Amino acid sequence: MKIRWGVIGAGGIAVNRTIPGMLASGSSTVAAVMRTDERKLAEVQARFPMAQGYVSVSEMLRDSGNLDAVYIASPVKFHLEHALACAAAGKPMLIEKPIGMNLGELEAIREACENAGVFFDGALMMRYHALHRKMRDAVRAGVIGDVVSIRMSFCFRYPEMAGAWRQRKEIGGGGVFMDLGPHCLDLVQFVSGRKIKRVAAFMDTMTFTYEVEDSASVLAELEGGGHALLSMHFNIPEDVAETRFDVYGTEGALLAGGTLGQEERGTLRLKRTGTVAAEEIQYEAGNLYAKEIDGFAELMNNRCRWSEAMDGQQELQRTLDAVYEAASLQETNGEG
Amino acid sequence: MKIRWGVIGAGGIAVNRTIPGMLASGSSTVAAVMRTDERKLAEVQARFPMAQGYVSVSEMLRDSGNLDAVYIASPVKFHLEHALACAAAGKPMLIEKPIGMNLGELEAIREACENAGVFFDGALMMRYHALHRKMRDAVRAGVIGDVVSIRMSFCFRYPEMAGAWRQRKEIGGGGVFMDLGPHCLDLVQFVSGRKIKRVAAFMDTMTFTYEVEDSASVLAELEGGGHALLSMHFNIPEDVAETRFDVYGTEGALLAGGTLGQEERGTLRLKRTGTVAAEEIQYEAGNLYAKEIDGFAELMNNRCRWSEAMDGQQELQRTLDAVYEAASLQETNGEG
């Protein structure tokens, strides 16, 4: 039996990526789509005719007998309300990142899940990228020695757009860091196998007129050693700044270009000290979202791992909060 | 008439780089070399037979009538003492970076210089690299739009070595950041044309057993906007981590690989948004140290610029101190 998904907030990411991922996966299908705008809902249903359409979460959950799991892709501000409703309906949830506007919201969602005997996980499909898994395996195997520096760059142009909730602090919770930070922080920890211990950050709105940050630079120190330097920008064109995810160790480096994003693509080169040529690592590209959905399906069947999954999301949200806190501290301090 | 240099601390950098630079320059020659170890002094003199040899600064300065300028390349701990002696002898000075162990030492040197009617400058030869000058010119001309992110990586392996003063805090003042930080911070400001406003930093001794940091990661925010992310390591082999100096703007990027170091080499690519191919910028390589020496000679003849030069060094040392301060603050804080 396939998992029948209900989708809350069937907008861009759901329609273009995650629902196609459900349909491409071995595990799932889409049974319901919810979107407040009726005209846009009709467009979504035209594209996915197997799904019932709803304009409110409560309506969708009245038919919850037809649903096995819910994917929440509404604006961040609404995650809490929607997740509490789904927990009350006894549905496990895949929630778009970030889970909450802050750690307090995530904790409320977790409590509701535990009371209802369900769970949630975050939609972090980039950790399913075959190259990121190969990087993790190589780090674990000691191929580059001890990891001492990780550098990520994730940039594209995202100018002012009418109606873009990611540009409104009250609805999206933040700007480029709220959008890309969860992926970057998760991948640093996923590949290094180390937790983030401390952070420092600068954030600014340098280029655009919206109220959220268009630029975020973050330093992290890892437990057990190693630094990470993360650079995220809405004001650098993608065609001049291929995404980078480079991991340097005492004996070598894993250099991934173009692997950050919605598709399983890009390249990975392994350089080892004392070896002239870099080795290009081969892989077979698939659909990150189908893999993410299959990963969630596996988790649904593995109740003993639910706590661990929610712990991971909780730690990630704690770190997101710490980064915003660090950036605001830097804001109010003088030099140094 | 050529400028006759006296060299204090005629060790590795002086003998291998700066004295050859003097001899290759149009402006200068070497007239005196000072080194405390007599046997090693004899080796230096064998290599530069035109230079008088001395085992102490006071001896060298007794013959100061033969000298027009002094290059101070002793360990950082001795810069203050040696610079005060040279100022008292009325000699302008080129001082290896960092100028002092801290800002207070630099200010004492400056006061002595102003009282004696001389000046000092810092030995920052990397700003003479033709590609760094081309980067500065391109930024000024707006070729990449508004600068929003600068990323530098400067790494090599520097394991424990008996007698290496750069590995002793009391003598070198610090580790990888004390050694490479002055160049990196100077180049960020030189190329962007913007001053550093605020910094955050993590430093650790991850890999080696010496007492100074082998790893330093620094964030800087620039006046007028823009972030810089600097990564400096003594524990990443050079052959897996080509130096990087990448400047990203809202319309393009200047990407310099292998330009940080003692030689005028490496490559610079210019990428502009909307253009498929990157443009490789051509240049003619010379001797960075000869250029540095000629630059100092020009400054000697341009008394109205002395204050500005010392201001620049003072600001740089202030920022160095701020980075160490930021790293030690992070050290004592909890998460975030």
Image (cartoon, coloured by chain):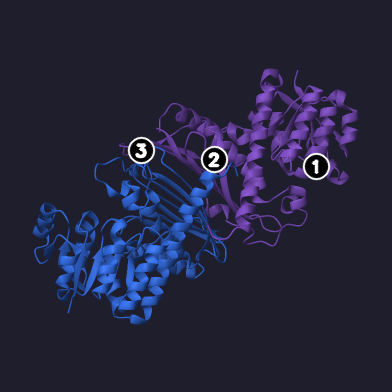
Chain colours: A purple, B blue
Q: Are circles 2 and 3 on residues that touch, CB within 8 Å?
A: no
Chain bearing tag 3 is: B
Q: Are circles 3 and 1 on residues that touch, CB within 8 Å?
A: no
Q: Nearer the viewer, mark 3 or mark 1?
A: 3
Q: Do discs 2 and 3 share a chain?
A: no
Going from N to C along the chain, the mark reached first, 2 or 1, is 1
- Label 3: few (<14), some or many (≥20) within 10 Å? some
Chain bearing tag 2 is: A
Three-letter residue code for mark 3: Phe
Three-letter residue code for mark 1: Phe
The image shows residue B42 at horizontal and vertical percentages of 9, 56
Q: Nearer the viewer, mark 2 or mark 3?
A: 3
Residue that mark 3 sits on? B208
Residue that mark 2 sits on? A259
Instruction: Describe residue A109's horizontal placement relative to residue A289 as left or right.
Output: right
The image shows residue A6 at horizontal and vertical percentages of 80, 31
One can see residue B295 in this view: yes
Residue that mark 1 sits on? A78
